[in-house]
Image (cartoon, rainbow, N blue to C red):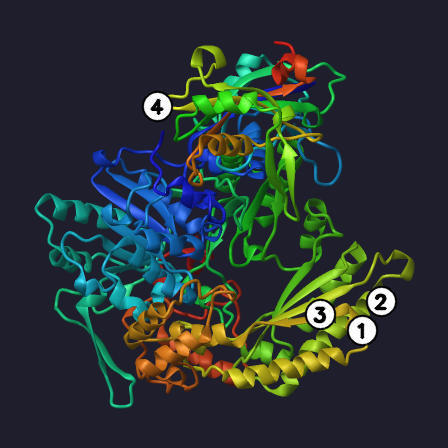
């Protein structure tokens, strides 16, 4: 009988016990007593979400390739189990060996979105690890954060010993070696952290001091010691041929959100949309070799038995060997019964041809990320898609048999006015009219459906809009109602659908995204009031935060609704991501004038990402 | 060609639901590179059907599915290839070839037998229960409650004896062997029998204090029950 952390009576009374038992296909088994470093790798959300995330699979594979290291997984217990574990004092455990997280050397947490911050506290709490880094001793687990939110980790900086900024493939070996060396000579937490801070990409928040002006803005962020670097440079892979890839991903028994092979074809994006954090912080755009990807696909099909393979990148149409790769994957359809799914593809004749081969047209819908209704506003945000392109794509799609279209928008973008907003229903109406013009009556199977959905724009660090104010929730709701009402007045309203996100969660995301260290007390207070799984509307309660802000004397509007002056020192000023502040500022100015910037391939804008010495910045020269 | 596969589901994987086990095998068959048949059409799926779904928490050494194969090697080779790509908790025991006219197994199941470990001395309760002319229990469904006589659905009930009932459930102080009606026409859950035994012994059972382990799945009439693998032949 294998070890099981939860007794049967608990497993039988909670939802989906398979989330907690481990034993999946392709998991790694090692004897924990025979390794030097034990790592508990955590995605602080429910199992089905966490298991769908490629980054964990990459790191799990990367760490476990080392004989001296055993990396296991842990996810957030769903609220039903959370309650049981607290009631019965069951410590949080890893899935592989079902042993307490606190017995591991490191707890590595990936921070994918701001709304998981309270889940980080849940993980620490259930593990019995002190919340604050300053309260941890030599014997306590080292808590490391990674992932996109670490480009501004300040709101959670007090809870972490270390942040690893950047792509894990680069510096983790050095960190493990350093840890081993310190462990061998009698471990001192402070000595280890001090030395770790000198490894590229490693940020030890306790070694930096933040000072503030009287108005609450930051005066400076300085290292406390001379040997600690002033800037932490985000690490990126420049040679994918030398980087490992998880060819044998762990396969969950229960259906995960991403229930298929994920083939990462590219990192970064050449487009430069001004609202998009991923498009800036993952620069430079780096493509993987197509022959290598074919080999990966072949082997992963054999290793997993999945019937579907999905290409992963920020903009698959910009992958230069896409045609060749897709031809190959489509050929596997006949030999291996493998289907291809194609997210983030630009709609044009080529992609429609491919999609008609791999999808059931009647069931699938086409997606256009228009982001803004008017051309004026699309120029402001540098979204290089025109109404003509959308209409042309739709016309081809309707002729090809599609009758469902999805449009994505944001509301609350900088400079946005009511005229821009009214273009959203107008565009949807035009598309529905195009359907009736394009498709003769006898060829229509049911009603055309144009679904427009809109989110609440959140300005993010390291984007040209990091200086921009976020609109107030009342104003967002007014704009949403204006658009909704206008939708209801359209002639083809029965073919149009408009949905929009709730204001409360996005507004809080806006506070946390550009927040500083003073927010840690707010997060802690909200957690103590019961906040967990805040990304889930069914669990999020706004009043926990409203009360927490008041109790901690923190004004959320300071972080969201202020337009920052050009020279304001940001909480993330000490982090370097390649893209320079001067470039972002000039993009902010150009945005306000509605001037577009060309993509990386048509013309280099000298953003600064060339400092990494690879990717699209050097494509023409190689 | 249709094959019948008998497999185990043990250990921690007793918490994997029936639908997830089906999805697991679909992938395992592909990993093992067995030449399973697919349906025609836009989204082809494997031609495979599972017998007698098992509730969460129960282990088994007598689970079955039937599947259509385009080509096949030997039972031993296929078993080896499958077992190599599956965890120790789900392993194939045997594979047999079904006659071409074999009906879908799901509808034909009539009985299943179990070993249930119980936390109380059960020997006297078994004797007492078997002497009763009828055994009335309350059967709960989602919408109603009804009193049913379960005695006709108990084909065998005895103190578990490894030399008679097979398998090897270790570390057991008290265990019951039971063979019960199972399938679409009439179906008796082992929990109801355990409940009746506990009542007879005057014991209040704690929830989930019994471990239920399925031994075999049967076809045929009550007086001529045959394990499902007997329908097929070796190859």
Label 2 Cα neighbours within 10 Å, binned few <14 / some 14-19 / many ≥20: few
Q: Are marks 2 and 1 in contact (CB under 8 Å)?
A: yes
- In this rendering, do the residues under marks 2 and 4 share a single chain? no
Disc on res. A256: none
- In primary-sequence order, the first of circles 3 and 2 is 2
- In primary-sequence order, the first of circles 2 and 1 is 2
Q: Quadrant of residue A228?
A: bottom left
- Kindly identify which residue carries mark 4: B171
Q: Marks 2 and 1, Cα distance to the nearest angstrom?
A: 10 Å
Label 1 Cα neighbours within 10 Å, binned few <14 / some 14-19 / many ≥20: some
Q: Nearest the camera: B28 or A396?
A: B28
- Kindly identify which residue carries mark 1: A492
Left or right of residue A480, residue A233 in this image: left
Q: Nearer the viewer, mark 1 or mark 4?
A: 4
- In this rendering, do the residues under marks 3 and 1 share a single chain? yes
Query: What chain letter is assigned to the residue under label 2?
Result: A
Q: Are marks 2 and 4 in contact (CB under 8 Å)?
A: no
Q: Marks 1 and 4, Cα distance to the nearest angstrom?
A: 71 Å
Q: Nearer the viewer, mark 3 or mark 2?
A: 3
- In this rendering, do the residues under marks 3 and 2 share a single chain? yes
Query: What chain letter is assigned to the residue under label 3?
Result: A
| Quarter of the figure that contains the N terminus of chain A | top left
- Kindly identify which residue carries mark 2: A436
Where residue B28 sits: x, y (%)?
A: 54, 30
Residue at the spot x=47%, y=32% of the render? B198
């Amino acid at each position: 009988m294998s070890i099981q952390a939860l007794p049967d009576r608990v497993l039988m009374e909670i939802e989906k016990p398979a989330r907690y038992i481990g034993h999946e296909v392709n998991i790694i088994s090692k004897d924990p007593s025979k390794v030097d470093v034990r790592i508990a790798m955590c995605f602080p959300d429910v199992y089905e979400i966490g298991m769908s995330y490629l980054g964990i699979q990459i790191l799990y594979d990367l760490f476990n390739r080392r004989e001296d290291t055993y990396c296991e997984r842990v996810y957030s217990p769903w609220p039903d189990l959370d309650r049981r574990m607290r009631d019965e004092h069951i410590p949080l455990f890893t899935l592989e060996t079902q042993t307490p997280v606190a017995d591991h050397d490191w707890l590595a947490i990936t921070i994918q979105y701001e709304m998981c911050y309270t889940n980080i506290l849940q993980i620490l709490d259930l593990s019995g690890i002190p919340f604050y880094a300053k309260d941890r001793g030599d014997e306590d687990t080292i808590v490391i954060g990674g992932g996109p939110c670490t480009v501004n980790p300040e709101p959670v900086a007090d809870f972490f010993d270390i942040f690893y900024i950047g792509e894990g493939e680069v510096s983790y070996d050095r960190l493990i070696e350093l840890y081993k060396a310190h462990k061998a000579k009698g471990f001192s937490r402070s000595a280890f952290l001090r030395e770790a801070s000198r490894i590229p990409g490693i940020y030890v928040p306790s070694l930096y001091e933040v000072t503030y002006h009287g108005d609450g803005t930051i005066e400076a962020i300085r290292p406390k010691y001379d040997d600690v670097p002033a800037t932490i440079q985000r690490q990126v892979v420049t040679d994918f041929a030398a980087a490992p890839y998880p060819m044998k991903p762990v396969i969950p028994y229960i259906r995960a959100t991403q229930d298929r092979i994920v083939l990462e074809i590219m990192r970064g994006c050449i487009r430069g949309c001004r609202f998009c954090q991923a498009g800036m912080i993952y620069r430079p755009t780096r493509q993987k070799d197509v022959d290598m990807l074919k080999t990966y696909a072949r082997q992963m099909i054999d290793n997993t038995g999945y019937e579907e393979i999905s290409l992963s990148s920020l903009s698959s149409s910009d992958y230069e060997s896409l045609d060749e790769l897709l031809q190959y994957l489509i050929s596997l359809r006949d030999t291996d019964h493998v289907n291809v799914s194609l997210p983030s593809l630009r709609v044009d004749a080529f992609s429609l041809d491919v999609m008609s081969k791999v999808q059931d047209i009647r069931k699938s819908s086409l997606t256009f990320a228009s982001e803004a209704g008017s051309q004026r506003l699309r120029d402001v945000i540098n979204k290089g898609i025109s109404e003509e392109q959308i209409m042309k794509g739709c016309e081809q799609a309707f002729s090809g048999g599609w009758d469902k279209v999805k449009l994505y928008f944001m509301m609350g973008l900088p400079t946005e006015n009511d005229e821009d907003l009214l273009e959203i229903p107008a565009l949807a109406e035009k598309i529905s009219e195009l359907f009736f013009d394009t498709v003769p009556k006898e060829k229509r199977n049911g009603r055309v459906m144009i679904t427009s959905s809109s989110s609440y724009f959140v300005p993010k660090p390291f984007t040209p809009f990091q200086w921009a104010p976020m609109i107030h929730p009342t104003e967002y709701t007014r704009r949403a109602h204006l658009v909704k009402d206008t939708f209801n007045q359209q002639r083809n309203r029965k073919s149009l659908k408009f949905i929009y996100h709730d204001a409360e969660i996005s507004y809080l995301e806006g506070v946390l995204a550009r927040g500083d260290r003073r927010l840690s007390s707010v997060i802690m207070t909200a957690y103590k009031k019961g906040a967990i799984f805040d990304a889930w509307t069914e669990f999020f309660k706004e009043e926990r935060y409203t009360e927490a802000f008041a109790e901690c004397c923190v004004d959320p509007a300071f972080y969201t609704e202020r337009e920052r002056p050009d020279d304001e020192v940001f909480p993330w000023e000490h982090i370097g991501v390649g893209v320079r502040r001067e470039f972002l500022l000039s993009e902010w100015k150009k945005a306000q004038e509605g001037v577009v910037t060309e993509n990386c391939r048509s013309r280099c804008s000298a953003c600064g990402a060339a400092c990494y010495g690879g990717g699209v910045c050097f494509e023409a020269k190689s | 060609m249709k094959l019948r596969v008998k497999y185990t589901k043990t250990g921690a994987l007793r918490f994997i639901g029936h639908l997830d086990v089906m999805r697991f095998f679909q992938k395992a068959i592909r990993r093992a590179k067995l030449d399973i048949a697919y349906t025609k059409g836009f989204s082809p799926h494997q031609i495979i059907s599972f017998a007698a779904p098992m509730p969460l928490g129960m282990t088994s050494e007598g689970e079955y599915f039937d599947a259509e194969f385009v080509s096949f090697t030997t039972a031993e080779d296929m078993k080896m290839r499958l077992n190599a790509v599956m965890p120790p908790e789900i392993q194939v025991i045997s594979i047999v070839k079904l006659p071409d006219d074999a009906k879908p197994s799901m509808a034909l199941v009539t009985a299943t037998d179990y070993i249930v470990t119980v936390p109380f001395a059960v020997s006297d309760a078994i004797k007492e229960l078997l002497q009763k002319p009828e055994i009335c229990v309350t059967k709960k469904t989602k919408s109603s409650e009804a009193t049913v006589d379960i005695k006709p659905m108990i084909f065998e009930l005895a103190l578990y004896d490894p030399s008679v009932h097979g398998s090897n459930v270790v570390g057991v102080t008290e265990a019951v062997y039971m063979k019960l009606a199972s399938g679409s026409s009439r179906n008796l859950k082992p929990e109801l029998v355990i409940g009746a035994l506990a009542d007879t012994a005057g014991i209040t059972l704690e929830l989930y204090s019994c471990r239920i382990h399925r031994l075999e799945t049967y076809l045929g009439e009550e007086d001529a029950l045959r394990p499902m693998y007997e329908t097929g032949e070796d190859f």
